[in-house]
Amino acid sequence: MTNKNVIPLLGITAYSGTGKTTLLKKVIPLLAKKNIQVGIIKHTHHDMDIDKPNKDSYQLRQAGAKQTLIACQQRWALMTETSNNTALDLAYLANQFDPQQTDLILVEGFKEESIPKIALYRATSNRPFLDIMDQHVIAVASDDKQATQLLQLDINSPEQIADYIANWLTNKL
């Protein structure tokens, strides 16, 4: 869709348990049908490891390799060790994506970042709606009407959300 080196970022922000990942699992294939190649950056507050203990790559990382690239015919993954004191840098992470294979990066987490965002909200959360809002929220997806002047989408309609994202992306390019 685009050959630009700067890939647009769109945040998906919500309280934990709102269904961000569940919604994205439905929206991503709909965007793919629109020929939009999606990348994902997901922030986790937990220490995580995508490698398996006792595998060669794991053992080499444990031996001190700062970066480990694992490759097979179908995919490759680069793991980079960081110190516990290193702040995550969204721009740096986004620059790791190949702009020839990615038209849009959806960002789950990083809610403090100054990027356009869709706020997801469920009335059953019993949490304050305004606490997930900031000046970078461009639309709200909810299961109930919210007190905002922003465009409101149906959180239970992945098709509507995918259409909105596709239109937003087209207007960004």
Image (spheres, helix red, strand yellow):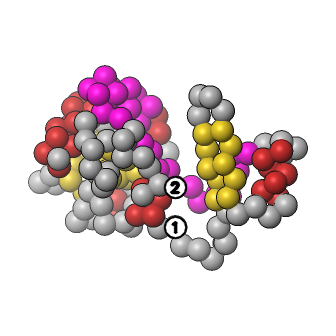
Residue identified by numbered label 1 = 88
Residue at position x 61%, y 44% in the image: 77
Residue 39: percent from the left, percent from the top? 42, 42
Residue lying farthest top?
A: 33
Image-quadrant location for residue 26: top left
Residue identified by numbered label 2 = 43
Q: Nearer the viewer, mark 1 or mark 2?
A: 1
Kind of element beneath mark 1: loop
Residue 33: percent from the left, percent from the top? 31, 22
Report the magenta residues as a range: 24-51
* 116 lies above or below 70: below
Residue lying farthest bottom?
A: 85
Locate the N terminus by quadrant. top left
Residue at position x 52%, y 55% in the image: 43
Residue 50: percent from the left, percent from the top? 68, 45
Are dots 1 and 2 in contact, CB under 8 Å?
A: yes
* 55 lies above or below 148: above
**Residue type, label 2:** His
Q: Earlier in the sequence, mark 1 or mark 2?
A: 2
Kind of element beneath mark 2: loop
**Residue type, label 1:** Leu
Classify residue 169 as left or right of residue 61: left
